Image (spheres, grey):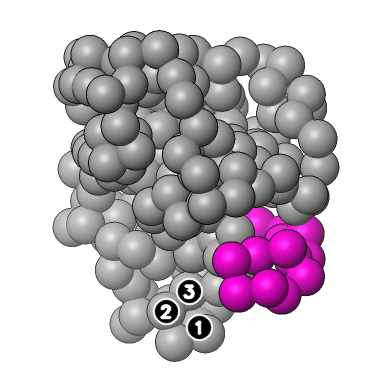
């Protein structure tokens, strides 16, 4: 049951590369080429062919262009892989069951976020190991919630729920470590079924 009293459904995370802006196919010719289309095509490619098969030449062939055309938008393969990780993690923002703040309680917020990451792992099993192991942009950003925006949102939400700064950072590290474990994607139970913490703020060590 959500906060508006509606019965929750168990959302499925859309495969990130399946739809691009404007509904165009990811393998459109160069006339519609841009960085986002290239990254979406790369996600699709890894889903279907595996990470080992991904090269700039192979990706260019999928998009109907020469590999050199990709370098106008992506400096090289390392940048491409970073973009793939960013693209897949950004899908959390489009997951209707993942909240950007703790509407019910901080445990509910964490559970929803964990299920969102699980849905990404299940939708993109070939990509998720890359998310979990790719070096982050900064040493304090931990996979799989490896974007600065998600890290800041996580810390802000827990602090608003009563965590002090140190407790919020410790929770972020522990939560990220749990989600990065190979067993986490399969270990979380499927679908919605979130146990709401109601209107009360759950107590925790380090809270104010």
Q: Which mark is residue 21?
A: 2
Label 1 element class: loop
Note whether 81 is above or below 183 in the view shown.
Answer: below
Q: Residue at x 43, y 49 (%)?
A: 102
Q: Is residue 1 left or right of residue 152?
A: right
Note whether 202 is above or below 166 in the view shown.
Answer: below
Sort mark 2 into few (<14), some (14-19) or many (20+) by Cα contacts within 10 Å: few
Residue 93 x %, y %? 43, 59
Note whether 126 is above or below 165 in the view shown.
Answer: below
Q: Which mark is residue 20?
A: 3
> Marks 3 and 2: CB-CB under 8 Å?
yes
Sort mark 1 into few (<14), some (14-19) or many (20+) by Cα contacts within 10 Å: few
Q: Is residue 154 visible?
A: no
Q: Residue at x 38, y 52 (%)?
A: 101
> Marks 3 and 1: CB-CB under 8 Å?
yes
Q: Residue at label 1? A: 24
> Marks 1 and 2: CB-CB under 8 Å?
yes
Quarter of image, res 147 = top left
**Gap in angstroms between the C-alphas marked 1 and 2:** 7 Å
Residue 48 x %, y %? 70, 47
Number of numbered discs: 3
Sort mark 3 into few (<14), some (14-19) or many (20+) by Cα contacts within 10 Å: some
Region in magenta: 1-16
Q: Is residue 138 left or right of residue 192?
A: left
Label 2 element class: helix
Q: Is residue 183 left or right of residue 197?
A: right
Q: Is residue 9 visible?
A: yes
Residue 7 vs residue 206, the one in the foreground: 206
**Magenta span dominant secondary structure:** loop
Q: Is residue 13 magenta?
A: yes
């Amino acid at each position: 049951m959500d906060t508006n009293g509606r019965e929750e459904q168990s959302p499925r995370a859309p495969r990130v590369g399946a739809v691009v802006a404007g509904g165009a196919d990811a393998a459109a010719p160069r006339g519609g080429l841009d960085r986002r289309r290239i990254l979406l095509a790369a996600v699709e490619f890894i889903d279907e062919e595996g990470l080992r098969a991904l090269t700039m030449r192979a990706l260019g062939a999928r998009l109907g262009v020469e590999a050199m055309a990709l370098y106008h938008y992506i400096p090289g393969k390392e940048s491409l892989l970073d973009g793939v990780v960013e693209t897949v993690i950004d899908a959390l923002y489009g997951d209707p069951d993942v909240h950007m703040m703790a509407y019910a309680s901080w445990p509910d917020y964490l559970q929803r976020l964990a299920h969102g990451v699980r849905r990404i792992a299940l939708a993109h099993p070939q990509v998720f190991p890359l998310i979990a192991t790719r070096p982050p942009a900064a040493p304090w950003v931990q996979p799989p919630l490896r974007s600065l925006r998600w890290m800041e949102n996580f810390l802000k939400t827990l602090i608003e729920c009563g965590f002090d700064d140190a407790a919020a950072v410790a929770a972020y590290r522990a939560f990220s470590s749990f989600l990065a474990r190979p067993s986490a994607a399969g270990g979380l139970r499927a679908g919605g079924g979130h146990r709401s913490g109601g209107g009360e703020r759950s107590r925790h060590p380090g809270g104010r």
